[in-house]
Image (cartoon, coloured by chain):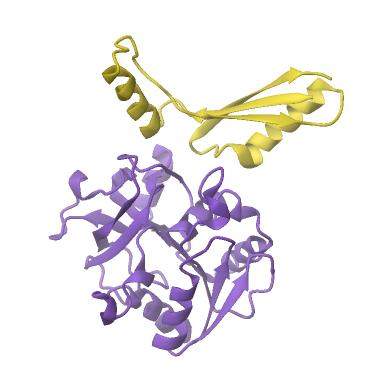
């Protein structure tokens, strides 16, 4: 099992993902520079958090034109597992690999805190080890995480079970006050139609070992190992 | 030639920045303000002398990069020939 971690100029969670894959899970892990087109035989590709291209113009807008993104798009099209975390999610949206767009948080501030989410789709390669309906806590840290999409797209996401994570109260109730950024329908993470491309704003990479006070995030990486090893 | 591209939130898309600016203007005493939509303007210098070609080119730039057409609209105008 090999993880490929894309590094854009401005990525800053690439090392975290690499550490999880290699040191915690004992998998192979390679960094993939955004100028390269070779995914180095990765079984799963991660677009990490950070500020690719300084978030200039719009978060993810310029990263989408990096040469590596053509390879990521091809890989995704063939069913390859792709995970976008935070800024990586924004890049996936701008690249059209996931539908919708991000706006500035409704509070107009950068929000950095733990959020609670309900896992609504356990069929993706990154969520297979979370029981459906289970609650997870992960940290967020973003300025543009206010997910929005046209009404027909939101409906299609709901109907297709493509809302993977939804912001909720600690007891699982989906309320407006549990929504940290104003995202439509409390959406924290979604997947594409085939379920192989997943994006979420919260950071599983920042809660993947007990040392950090929370290890709930490592299940996303373990899910990928389980899902791809048995394929 | 100079081309100006304005990018702004589409009608019907919530604009958190515009809303915040509108309420700040209200607090400053500008009671007549009913709504603000906040966008961006790009001043682009392009080579060539055909304003129509420049305009068509700028439209493509807006669609491909300057605007996220999921949530943003745009308009283009050639400001000056040279």
Colour that chain B carries in the picture: yellow
Nearest the viewer among A67 and A16 is: A16
Left or right of B60? Residue A60 is left
The structure residue drawn at horizontal position 69% and vertical position 69%, both measured from the top left corner, is A36
Residue B11 placed where, x, y %? 44, 25
Residue A3 appearing in the image: yes
Left or right of A205? Residue A170 is left
Q: Is residue B14 above or below residue A54?
A: above
Residue A11 placed where, x, y %? 52, 63
Q: Is residue A132 above or below residue B80?
A: below
Colour that chain A carries in the picture: purple
The structure residue drawn at horizontal position 33% and vertical position 29%, both measured from the top left corner, is B20
**Outermost residue, bottom side:** A26
Nearest the viewer among A127 and B16 is: B16
**Outermost residue, top side:** B32
Query: Quadrant location of residue A109?
Result: top left
The structure residue drawn at horizontal position 44% and vertical position 90%, both measured from the top left corner, is A26
The structure residue drawn at horizontal position 66% and vertical position 61%, both measured from the top left corner, is A70
Left or right of A34? Residue A117 is left
**Outermost residue, right side:** B49
Residue A205 placed where, x, y %? 38, 71
Left or right of A110? Residue A54 is right
Residue A192 appearing in the image: no
Q: Is residue A146 above or below residue A195?
A: above
Marker count (numbered): 0
**Outermost residue, left side:** A171
Q: Is residue A48 above or below residue B57?
A: below
Residue B23 placed where, x, y %? 30, 23
């Amino acid at each position: 099992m090999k993880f490929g971690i894309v590094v854009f100029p401005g990525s800053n969670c690439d090392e975290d993902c690499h550490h999880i894959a290699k040191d915690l899970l004992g998998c192979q892990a390679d960094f993939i520079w955004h100028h390269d087109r070779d995914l180095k035989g990765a079984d799963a590709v991660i677009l990490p958090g950070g500020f690719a291209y300084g978030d200039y113009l719009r978060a993810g807008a310029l990263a989408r034109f990096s040469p590596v993104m053509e390879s990521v798009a091809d890989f995704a099209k063939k069913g390859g597992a792709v995970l976008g975390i935070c800024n990586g999610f924004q890049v996936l949206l701008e690249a059209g690999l996931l539908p919708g767009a991000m706006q500035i948080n409704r509070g107009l501030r950068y929000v950095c805190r733990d959020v609670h989410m309900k896992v609504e789709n356990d069929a993706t390669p990154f969520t297979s080890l979370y029981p459906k309906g289970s609650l997870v806590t992960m940290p967020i840290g973003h300025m543009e995480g206010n997910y929005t999409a046209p009404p027909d797209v939101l409906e299609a996401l709901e109907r297709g079970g493509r809302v993977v994570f939804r912001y909720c109260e600690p007891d699982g109730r989906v309320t407006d006050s549990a929504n940290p950024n104003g995202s439509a329908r409390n959406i924290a993470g979604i997947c594409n139609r085939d379920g192989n491309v997943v994006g979420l704003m919260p950071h599983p990479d920042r809660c993947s070992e007990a040392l950090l006070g929370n290890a709930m995030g490592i299940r996303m990486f373990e899910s990928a190992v389980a899902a791809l090893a048995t394929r | 030639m100079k081309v100006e591209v304005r990018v702004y939130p589409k009608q019907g898309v919530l604009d958190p920045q515009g809303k915040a600016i509108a309420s700040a203007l209200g607090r400053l005493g500008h009671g007549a303000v009913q709504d603000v939509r906040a966008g961006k303007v790009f001043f682009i210098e392009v080579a060539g002398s055909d304003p129509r070609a420049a305009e068509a080119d700028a439209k493509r730039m807006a669609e491909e990069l300057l605007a996220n057409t999921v949530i943003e609209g745009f308009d283009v105008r050639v400001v000056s020939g040279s």
